[in-house]
Image: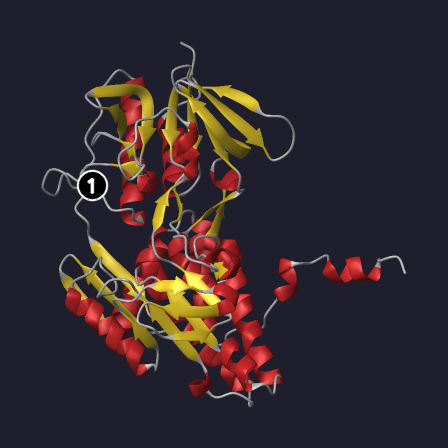
Amino acid sequence: MNPKRILVVGAGHVGLYAALRLSKKLSSREAEVVVVDPQPHMTYQPFLPEAAAGNISPRHSVVPLRRELRRCKVVAGTVTRIEHDRKVATVQPISGPTREIPYDHVVVAPGSVSRTLPIPGLHEHGIGFKTIGEAIYLRNHVLDRLDVAAATQDAQVRRSALTFTFVGGGYAGIEALAEMEDMARDALRYYPELEPEDMRWVLVEATQRVLPEVDRDMGAYTVQQLLKRNMDIRLDTRLESCVDGVVKLSDGDSFRSDTIVWTAGVKPSPMLDATDFPRDERRRVTCLPTLQVVDGDRVVEGAWSAGDCAAVPDLTKEPGNFCSPSAQHAVRQAARMADNIANVIRGRQPVDYKHKHAGSVASLGLHKGVAQVYGIKMTGWPAWFMHRTYHMSRIPSFNRKVRVVVDWSLAFFLKREVVALGQLHDPREEFAEASQPR
């Protein structure tokens, strides 16, 4: 028989794990796996805070696609349209004209993007925290602000440079805030002009609690620990404007801040708007527990989805509940989906995805953390150690596991790197100025 072509759209947690499992379970005579993604790597997002803080090398928090997916065909490009009625996807390669890729099965896993609001000034002054580029930029920017503050004699410039605002109190926001503050405090030993009290770290959260994935007492503990580090925690408060770097909050306070990090949730990738798949009110692809796309009562044959962009029923809860957009679900859904695709190709029935959320772990900086796993709650060093152990076990490839462990081991003997490489963000500026006709 002719091998089936399986097109995997997106190489995030779902796409990479699904493609890797499919390539191992199915022979070349049974199926050809094609992966399309504009990036040459998969970013292990739980390690972004550690990469930004300099605990691990940024390169070690990403997984090269071509190294891991050697039995798959990797296409560097963007899927601009999917016409499932024709079973054809339109792909825009990095360079050159568009091309059409026909398929028999499609895995729709473009993931999510930052969910922003129409807040004045946010587009001009905000920075997200979902990609490795954003993590590197934030690290360089924070260290650069320390240099600005140390060099200036203008009190207003110094206050603005040393005010760091994070919007969103979920895991991404809390970990980014805690790790960056930890790094900046460590860096101040090399800045005799500055004191830790000169820095102001502000967390703005629209609800009355942080870390909604864990119990309230664990969220309260996290707030207490951040307050002990003299952070400014604003709960039940919204960002209303940040025009010209002036942060205005719903509680009436306003202040200048050179750093505004937006981590207030995610939404399904807008790429889904260019498909003919059914969507729910939150714009997620509607799915059965088998990870098959469903339109009402009709199964959309050959279409599969999982992860942040999919509405997958959570069978461990009451009807009407869906799996949360977490890496924990995404990795397990990818494995179940790959097995189900293999079952269908071999003439068997797909199996429902069912996984009870094991819990959550979060780092609050070096040797600090919170964890709630299978009902067991931990704080401090044990929680931090569990956070590292869990994510080290989950990052794909033995190569990356070893490199991350080596980074952590060296950190016990060597001081943290606190140098800003801001020229990375505009590397041609110096040459352009030198080569400018006079």
Visual colour scheme: secondary structure
Q: Above or below — where is 227 with respect to 93?
A: below
> In this rendering, is residue 348 above or below 67?
above
Q: Is residue 191 above or below residue 427?
A: below
x and y, in percent, of residue 148 in the image: 59, 78
Q: Give the image location of residue 392, x and y in percent.
A: 37, 57
In which quadrant of the rendered image does the N terminus lie?
top left
Residue at the far right in the pictured view: 438
375 left or right of 282 in image: left
Q: Nearer the viewer, residue 114 or 292?
A: 114
Task: Give, as a three-letter code, the residue at label 1.
Answer: Phe
Identify which residue, 8 or 108, lies in the foreground.
Answer: 108
In the depicted view, which residue is nearer to us: 415 or 116? Answer: 116
Residue drawn at 21 percent across, 23 percent down = 296
Of the pair 171 and 47, the residue shown nearer to us: 171
* Image quarter hosting the C terminus: bottom right
Instruction: Name which residue lies at 73% across and 60% down.
Output: 429
As drawn, 93 above or below 399: above
Choose top left, top right, bottom left or bottom right for residue 365: bottom left
Please give left or right for residue 377 compared with residue 204 in the image.
left
Return the x and y of residue 140 as percentages of the image width and height: 56, 67
Is residue 418 visible in the rendered image? The answer is no
Q: Locate residue 179 relative to residue 250 in the image: left or right.
A: right
Mark 1, other Cα within 10 Å: few <14 / some 14–19 / many ≥20:
some
Q: Residue furthest left?
A: 318
Residue at image x 18%, y 38%?
354
Could you say where residue 197 lies in the image, as x and y percent from the top left? 42, 87
Q: Residue tagged by mark 1?
A: 322
Q: Residue furthest front?
A: 252
Please tell me whether mark 1 sits on a helix, a strand or a loop.
loop
Q: In which quadrant of the rendered view does residue 220 lie?
A: bottom left
